[in-house]
Image (tube, grey):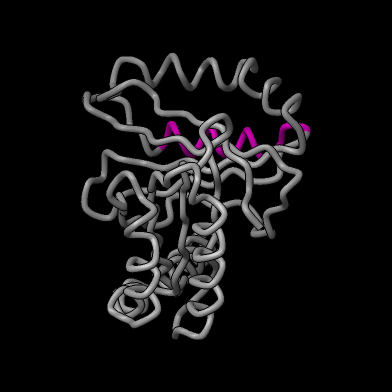
């Protein structure tokens, strides 16, 4: 009995000592004039290179939607919100916005996120198949966060999965962004047809606040 109590106490102490994940993300979407796509990609790369020098920079990824040239998703990862806020006010961020102002045909839709569940970090490659999904929960009952965690954990074990991350909106806890990477379209198709995905979607349907916004992307190096 004493050993059990000591084990439980040790577990509680370890949990209490576990560092809080302060990682902060922004997920942005912007539409660029097709004729200006090359110039926009150049501006994105320059923005990333300049941002690397900012305190708290972790990484910055660019994706272009498949079948929709010029529609970009920008995922920024920062050590914490303070670093992200300082970066947003920095000259390089303002310079990037100025450069794309004349190219864009939509506003830059940027949303703040925190970690819900992450797999093993790895660098994205242009050969992978990417899916970025916005999940909006409107109903009550099922715990959407648990539903997404279960999906992520199972999906990471599937053949061909390279990444399955879930982010949660920092101010609207019912909004999530799911970032997937698969070795091939075949692997992604098999995942979409799997029992795991079907179970997740069946559980999500009654509580979804809007249709599942799931889009295929390619990585912009």
* 17 relative to 11, above or below: below
Residue 154 position within the rendered picture, expressed as x and y whole percent measured from the top left: 62, 33
| Residue lying farthest to the front in this orientation | 35
- Residue 161 location, quadrant: top right
Residue 4 position within the rendered picture, expressed as x and y whole percent measured from the top left: 53, 58
Asked if residue 60 is among those painted magenta in the image, a careful observer would answer no
- Residue 79 location, quadrant: bottom left
Point 51% across, 85% down: residue: 53
Residue 137 position within the rendered picture, expressed as x and y whole percent measured from the top left: 28, 30
Point 43% across, 31% down: residue: 147
Please state the extent of the stretch shown in magenta in the rendering. Answer: 146-159
Asked if residue 151 is among those painted magenta in the image, a careful observer would answer yes
* 162 relative to 151, above or below: below
* 171 relative to 179, above or below: below
Left or right for 185, reference 87: right
Q: Name the chief secondary structure element in magenta.
A: helix
Left or right for 107, reference 198: left
* 110 relative to 55, above or below: above
Point 32% across, 59% down: residue: 101
Point 42% across, 42% down: residue: 177
Q: Nearer the viewer, residue 75 or 45?
A: 45
Residue 171 position within the rendered picture, expressed as x and y whole percent measured from the top left: 21, 53
Left or right for 116, reference 111: right
- Residue 114 location, quadrant: bottom left
């Amino acid at each position: 009995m004493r050993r059990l109590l000591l084990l439980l106490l040790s577990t509680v102490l370890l949990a209490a000592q576990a560092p809080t994940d302060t990682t902060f993300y922004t997920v942005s979407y912007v539409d660029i004039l097709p004729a200006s796509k090359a110039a926009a990609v150049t501006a994105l790369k320059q923005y990333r290179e300049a941002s690397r020098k900012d305190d708290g920079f972790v990484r910055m990824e660019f994706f272009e939607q498949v079948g929709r040239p010029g529609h970009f998703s920008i995922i920024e990862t920062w050590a914490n919100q303070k670093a992200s806020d300082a970066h947003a006010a920095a000259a390089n961020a303002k310079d990037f916005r100025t450069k794309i102002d004349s190219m864009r045909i939509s506003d830059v839709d940027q949303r703040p996120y925190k970690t819900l569940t992450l797999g093993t970090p790895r660098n994205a490659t242009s050969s992978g198949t990417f899916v970025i999904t916005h999940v909006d929960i409107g109903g009550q009952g099922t715990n959407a966060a648990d539903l997404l965690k279960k999906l992520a954990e199972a999906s990471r074990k599937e053949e061909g999965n390279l990444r399955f991350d879930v982010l949660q909106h920092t101010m609207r806890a019912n909004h999530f962004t799911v970032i997937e990477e698969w070795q091939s379209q075949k692997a992604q198709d098999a995942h979409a047809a799997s029992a795991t995905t079907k179970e997740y979607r069946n559980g999500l349907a009654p509580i979804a606040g809007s249709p599942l916004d799931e889009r295929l992307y390619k990585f912009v190096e």
